[in-house]
Structure formats: structure tokens, C-alpha cells
Amino acid sequence: MTEIKYDDNLKLICSYGDGLNYQEVLDDFENAKKVRIVTYNISKKTNDGSNLKRLMDLPEGTDIQIITNIPNHWDTYFKGAAQKYRASLELYLGKLNPELYNANNFVGFKFDNHAKLIGTDNILYIGSANYSDESARNEEMGFITTDKDFIEKVYKEIFETTKIASEPYFDDPYNALRLFIVGFEVKYKVYIKLLEEGTIYVGEDGVFVTDGTNLSTETLVDLYNDFDIIQDIENVVDDLYDEENEDEYNDLYSFINELKELDLSDVQDSLLEDGNIYNLIVFDDVERANEILQNEYASEAWDENLDRYVEIAMQDADEELSELKLNAEYDLIALYKTLVSAKSIFSRMHDYLLSIASEHVNTSLDNT
């Protein structure tokens, strides 16, 4: 394999049957928040140990989007060509079925595509190699860049254009809603884990608040905004209504009604500045002890009395902290239970949307 470096952010890599010349991109998958792939074909072999297996094993929350051609697709077919394409179509639908992936993914098919692009939010390959194991045995050439501004520009201006022109795996009207719900399901799972790791203890006798908290004001802002967006889901579902999908619409609305019962606005209030949870998070007991020492005990806290008044100030600060914890206890438990309930609703809603999607594999993919 030969590398020619242009600068710190750009190099050309040529392979000669000695591996994948975009291996650096694959190695970055574990750090990626997003993965974008445009390819002419995918691997024909089993998924075990392959590039596709790498995608399937990416964690929830990773945004995967794949655009591929399907070999043997033609506008018209002669003799056994139609049967050959159907075999390819069945193979691709099986390997790219979104239900096989842990992460949130979009799959599209573009039958005039011969471009190749493989990247994450950190690194991007553009060259001749397909996203297939077989490419490791070929002579391939391509550029790799780590210029994040350029990478984002490529995704916005080129990848999105290709995506819009592609045929989606599913042709039901719920693709956008499904991706939206999956995103929130993952977000809430992360919030729940965060609370359980440093703020909430779940025992046999119930849910309790621990002595400390690992929340930040930034997390509270994110939570508040996410609760706001949840309350807009009803509008998203309303926009999908038509007479042909009335039964599905009614089923989805049952989940909306469950979300409404959670009283999200009450939980949001506890996240605002000067709310009980906010006041607990921003409280610094050491800083507060110093303030108390300066403001209340400065005249007495000198020479041999200093250590004694430092201890008194720290005790006063601890008492204030205990009061803040007591005030926030109800709100923290309510926040945790609301997140758990919302995540459960999103999970069931996601499962329902997948059950709909399984009946709506895009029929236009088969033109035979």
C-alpha cells in the first residue's frame, strides 16, 4: 500500500490487493457519531466479520446512512437477466434490512450510482473502492481527509443530493417519524444511564436519590429542550394522516396520548434556573463555605480561631446542601420516572413503526 501525503489533513492511498485503502475510516467507526456510505455494491459474502458486520455492531445513537446501487439492475431485461437481478435484490434487502442494525440507519438505492464515499464525522474517504470485503483484493486508489469542515460540506452538498435522488428501503410514509423516534429512544436511554450512574439509586424498595449528582447545567438545558420537542410529536403524527392509513394513525395516536399523560411541563419547571434540581447542581459547598467564612465569621476567624470557624462554615454549607438535596429529591425521582416512562413509550412506538415498515418494503425496487 502506498501513501502520498499532501498536508496534515489530506493524503492519497493506493492499495494493490493488500487490504482496504480506507481502513482508517473503519477504525474510526468506534468514535463516530455519524457514518455516511455511498457505494456501487456491498459484500456478497456472509455478514460475519465483514464490513457490514462493523455497521451492524455500531451502538445505538450512531447515525448510519447508506446509499448503494444494486448490480444487475437494468431498465429492461432479456432471458435470465431478470432472475439474476431479483437474486441480487433479495441479497441486498436481506443484508441491509434496518432491523438487523443496532444503530439508527437509513438505506437508499440509486441505480445510476457508481460513486464511492465512506466516512464518519471525523474522517472521509473518496475513491475507487466499494464498501465491500472484496475491495481488499483489488487495486484501488482514493483520497482520505480529516478536514471536518470539508467533510461536513461534502455531506450537506453531495451526500444529501444523492440521498434525495435515491429510492428508500421502505416506502411507507413513516420513515422520518421512525428515525425521529429512534433518536429520542436512544437519547432517553443515555439520560437514564447518566442518572443511574451518579444521581439515582434503584433498589428493591423503590427509587432513591444518592448523596451526589453527576448532572450539569448543560444536561438540564438539553433535557428541557428535548421535552419541548416531544410535545411537538403530535403535530408530526397529524401531518401523516390520510384516509388510507387511518388505522395506523389511530394506533400512533394512542402512544401520543400516553406521552401527554406524563405531565412533561411539570418536570420541565424543575429544570429551569432557580428550580430545585438546578439549584442543587450549581451549588458548590467549598465556595459557599468560603463565602460564609468571609461574610459571617470574618471578625472572629483569625489566629487560633481560624480552624474552628472554617469547620463551622463548612458545617453551615453542608446544612444548606442537605436542604437543597431534600428539596430536589422529589423532582429528581419524578424526572427519572418520567424518562423511564417516555423511553418505554418510544420503544413500543419504534417496534410498532418497524412492524408497519416490514409490510412496506419499496416495491419500486423490483422493476422486473
Image (spheres, grey):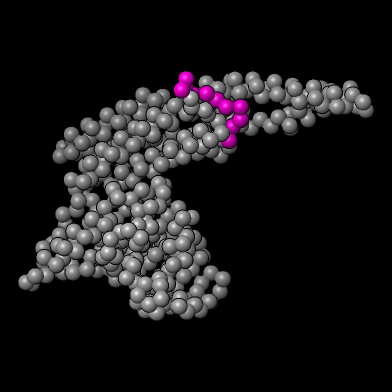
Of 205 and 240, the residue lying toward us? 205
Q: Is residue 152 visible?
A: no
Q: Is residue 256 left or right of residue 249?
A: right
Placement of 260 over or under 245, stated as above or below: above
Q: Quadrant of residue 340?
A: top left
- The magenta span reads 204-214
Image point 23% across, 65% down: which residue? 70
Q: Quadrant of the N terminus?
A: bottom left
Provide residue 289's location: percent of width, then percent of height. Answer: 76, 28
Provide residue 65's location: percent of width, then percent of height. Answer: 35, 56
Farthest residue, direction right: 303
Provide residue 323's location: percent of width, then percent of height. Answer: 64, 20
Image point 57% across, 27% down: which residue? 210
Provide residue 237's location: percent of width, then percent of height. Answer: 28, 37
Image point 18% across, 38% down: which residue? 245
Placement of 269 over or under 113, stated as above or below: above
Specify whether residue 213 is painted magenta: yes
Farthest residue, direction left: 79
Q: Is residue 190 visible?
A: yes
Specify whether residue 201 is painted magenta: no
Task: Count numbered badges in the picture.
Answer: 0
Q: Quadrant of the C terminus?
A: bottom left
Q: Is residue 290 left or right of residue 110?
A: right
Placement of 88 over or under 98, stated as above or below: below
Q: Quadrant of residue 47?
A: bottom left
Image point 85% across, 27% down: which residue? 307
Q: Is residue 59 left or right of residue 246?
A: right
Placement of 41 over or under 261, stated as above or below: below
Q: Main secondary structure of the magenta part?
A: loop
